[in-house]
Amino acid sequence: MAKKNIIVRSIPSGITFINLIMGFFSILYTLEDKFNIAALLILGACVFDVLDGLVARKFGLISKMGVELDSLADATSFVIAPSLLIYADLAGYFWTAPFISVFLAVMGIFRLAKFNVTEYHKSFLGMPTPAFAAIACFFVLTNTILSEWALMIFFLIVGILMVSNIKFPNFKDEAFMKYKYMGILIFSAVVVAFLWGLDLFSIVLIENISLRFFLIILLYFSKLVKRKVFMLIFMFGLLIITVLAYSSPKALLMLVLLYSVIASPLLQASFEQKKIQKNTQKKRDKK
């Protein structure tokens, strides 16, 4: 029985190690100039990063050791691996590649350290490192081409967002679980579509239809959204991007991802509004 309990308690850490292993192999494939495989391994690590936390919370298996392992695995899979991938992808074209890569690595590690010493985890302060990793991977997978100055500004913004105090949604609350599972399925479907070699148009179709109809619209009509105006603004932005980039599947895939990450504080604002109103009412009652 005791042996069984040890095995059960080790499940979240085992999932974390899969995350770490995928990040490590991503680095190896990057060094072998197999950038697409490296990017897909990082995206796979993102899925396992979500799963280890879900399993640990679901079965009450959260531990200090698990938290530390998760942080170290994240540093490998979502900071070092994507930063190296960006460097390798840009090195042959831009002399600024090593500086961009080092900057992103420093910002990412600082972001993880900041998370570890922050007690309030109901929302993320700053863009999470898996979001940065996903942006880096899709940047490589879609072969996005930008000028050197545009690249520097783009990754400067990404780095600053990671260490900023802007609130990003966490989705750890039990009420968000079914939407989180749906998000994992959508993300996994996109990764599998890339692995199967589906054309980019089909991948964009899977992502956009799933994102809009099976996640955002359902979330909009749920009781979790306290002030729907923020959600409407978020949805309107997605619609504008779709209209502007519909003729280019590559641009649409990248822009939807970027917008979903950068504009996600709008979602957090829509979730927190009722709480703000309640606090205001309590202050009035005290007066």
Image (spheres, helix red, strand yellow):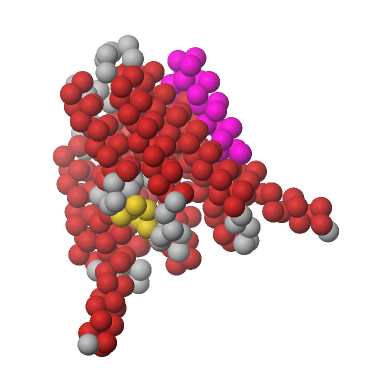
On screen, residue 202 versus residue 18, left or right, reads: left
- The residue depicted at 34 percent of the width and 31 percent of the height is 104
- The residue depicted at 50 percent of the width and 33 percent of the height is 76
* Magenta-span inclusion, residue 35: yes
- The residue depicted at 33 percent of the width and 42 percent of the height is 162
Image quadrant assignment for residue 198? top left
- Residue 131: image x %, image y %? 38, 42
- Magenta segment, which residues? 17-37
On screen, residue 17 versus residue 98, left or right, reads: right
Vertical order, 83 against 274 (above or below): above
- Residue 69: image x %, image y %? 58, 43
Quarter containing the C terminus: bottom left
Instruction: Name the chief secondary structure element in magenta.
Output: helix
Q: Nearer the viewer, residue 206 or 159?
A: 159
Quarter containing the N terminus: bottom right
Vertical order, 39 against 6 (above or below): above
Vertical order, 99 against 118 (above or below): above
- The residue depicted at 45 percent of the width and 36 percent of the height is 78
Image quadrant assignment for residue 179? bottom left
- Residue 72: image x %, image y %? 53, 39
On screen, residue 140 versus residue 249, left or right, reads: right
- Residue 138 in view: no
